[in-house]
Image (cartoon, helix red, strand yellow):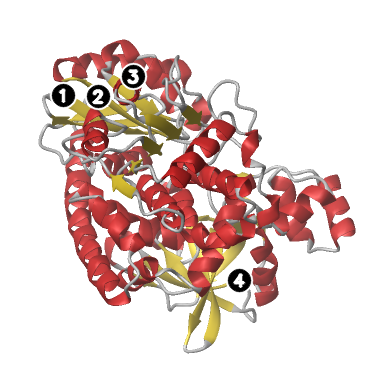
Amino acid sequence: MPDPEQTIWQQIPFDEAVVRRLSSSLNADPLVCRLLAQRGITSEEEATFFMNPAIPGLHNPFEMKDMKLAAERLDKAVQNGEQILLYGDYDVDGTGAVSMMFAFLSRLTSQLDYYIPDRISEGYGLGVQGVEYALNHRCTLLLAMDCGIRDHEAVNMAREHGIDVIICDHHLPGDEIPAAYAVLDPKQPGCAYPFKELCGCGVAFKLVHALAMLNNTPVEELASLLDLVAVSTACDIVPLTGENRILVKFGLQRLNRRPRPGLWALMESVHRTPPLTVQDLVFGLGPAVNSAGRLGDARDAVKLMLSNDRNSALDMARQLARRNAERRRVDYAMADEARVKVKELADLKVRKSIVLFNPAWHKGIIGISASRIAEDFHKPTVILTESNGRAVGSARSVRGFDLYEAILKCSDLLISYGGHAHAAGLQLPVESVEAFGRKFEEAVVASVKQEYETPVLEVSATVGFDEITRDLIQSLRVLEPFGPHNMTPVFVAEAVRDTGKSKILQNNHASLSLRQNADGPVLTGMAFGLADSFSRVKKGPFDIAFSLKETGKNGASQIELVVKGIRQH
């Protein structure tokens, strides 16, 4: 496991001239302008749009390839009272997309149904069982959301039986695009849509946006749907830039001011109180929603999100919270077992990748375990288990490494695969696991760059404790919501000292009480997983890397440090 002290603290580069120009033209805090410049924002126009995202700033949905076909076909189905099946993947993005589309279309038609495949028995994607369900329920239009871009067999089956399929996906397509009635995917060849990083629910929302435009409905009237879009976008870990920032910002506003009963109940059951942040969605609401499909029926998540009764919603949400607690128990046990297997690898020190297979591991948890192992050992990781006679797996990457390209080089050994640069899923014959491990290692060795093998903590600026004020916190809020490609700023404070009130906690955590100058302010915070580092340096001055958090207790607010790194001064 990498030593936190081996992590490189790397200053994010920026152009001083850009900072001066932005500070002058915007009359803004130079530190905020520095953070903008570090995000590649160089003009007053870009900065103004970034700091003031607005719903009218969303792109015209008809710029997306096949959108006119899709919107007109959906409009026809609604007008003619056709039976429509909403099909979504079993994770937050897929169930959120189904819930969002159902919430919108139910205002226009009662001829709606939804289908979520079983994670264990059916697996990922638009499958033939879903098409059979559509046939049995006399559906003539099927909307596949957060899936479908590689599901040729199911799409062809639907076509042969007179069912039109509209795909709303965001994953990378294969060499051929399925022969669906319409395919909405910004990543497909020939699509000129200017923003490529929508999640599956985001693509489905653009279809809703287009349908609204066909019927002269202002986009602002769709704001009630953005809470579901925000949860899906945040939990799918897509870049929080461009349209995604707009969708998440206004979705969070909706969640914090007037959440729908199902999401309110979820917030209550996982003890996340407004104002919620992206982190609350990713680490609070998202795991509870995902637990429905990981250890049960993913349709329970849709039922919850569509519930209009607070009491029944609270019952369902508490059930998901209990299921998530069970998921955590299984997850931690599996991750511990996986760590032991990694440490037993004879060539661990020279290996560039990790591939583990255990037929007893739970299929619904392997993605989480892959994330933990990749983070712990800082190597691209594939975790495999056995399901229906096949090895099925989840893969996770490390900073800067294109995981999908490495898996693509192993495609001759795979039955199916899909994903993107950071995460992927795959299936292969059990007898091919060993060969896959060798070939994947070769692909990683050929592609991974040496500078990506060492963990890096990107730092925005060095600040003094006396600069950490509520005015600074307020200034930083214009950059929210924070997330991938717009990360929470990490600062460095040099030569800080323990006040004597810091405490070592369980699980290598520490509660810190620090002072930089004898007569300066005392700041407190948490250092998760860094107690060992703190113990080695606490007697002398040391440097800390941290982000800032404002917490409210009994009507009063307090600034806290979230310590990311500790090193000898």
**Residue at image point 22% right, 40% down:** 119
Amino acid residing under circle 2: Gln
Question: Which of the two marks, 2 or 4, is nearer to us in this view?
Answer: 2
Q: Which mark is residue 390?
A: 1
Q: Which of the two discs, 1 and 3, labels the residue nearer the N terminus?
A: 1
Indicate whether 262 appears above or below 389. below
Q: Is residue 410 left or right of residue 136?
A: right
User: Mark 2 sits on what residue?
Assistant: 427
Q: Are marks 4 and 3 in contact (CB under 8 Å)?
A: no
Question: Which of the two marks, 4 or 3, is nearer to us in this view?
Answer: 3
- Nearest to the observer: residue 193 or residue 32: 193
Disc 3 element: helix
User: Mark 4 sits on what residue?
Assistant: 516
Quadrant, the N terminus: top left
User: Mark 3 sits on what residue?
Assistant: 441
Q: Is residue 201 left or right of residue 151?
A: right
Q: CA distance from mark 1 to mark 3?
A: 21 Å
Amino acid residing under circle 3: Glu
As drawn, the residue found furthest toward the top would be 412
Q: CA distance from mark 3 to mark 2?
A: 17 Å
Residue 68: x %, y % from top left: 59, 34
Indicate whether 117 appears above or below 224. above
Q: Is residue 47 left or right of residue 501?
A: right
Amino acid residing under circle 4: Gln
Q: CA distance from mark 1 to mark 2?
A: 7 Å
**Residue at image point 41% right, 48% down:** 97
Disc 4 element: loop
Q: Are marks 1 and 2 in contact (CB under 8 Å)?
A: yes
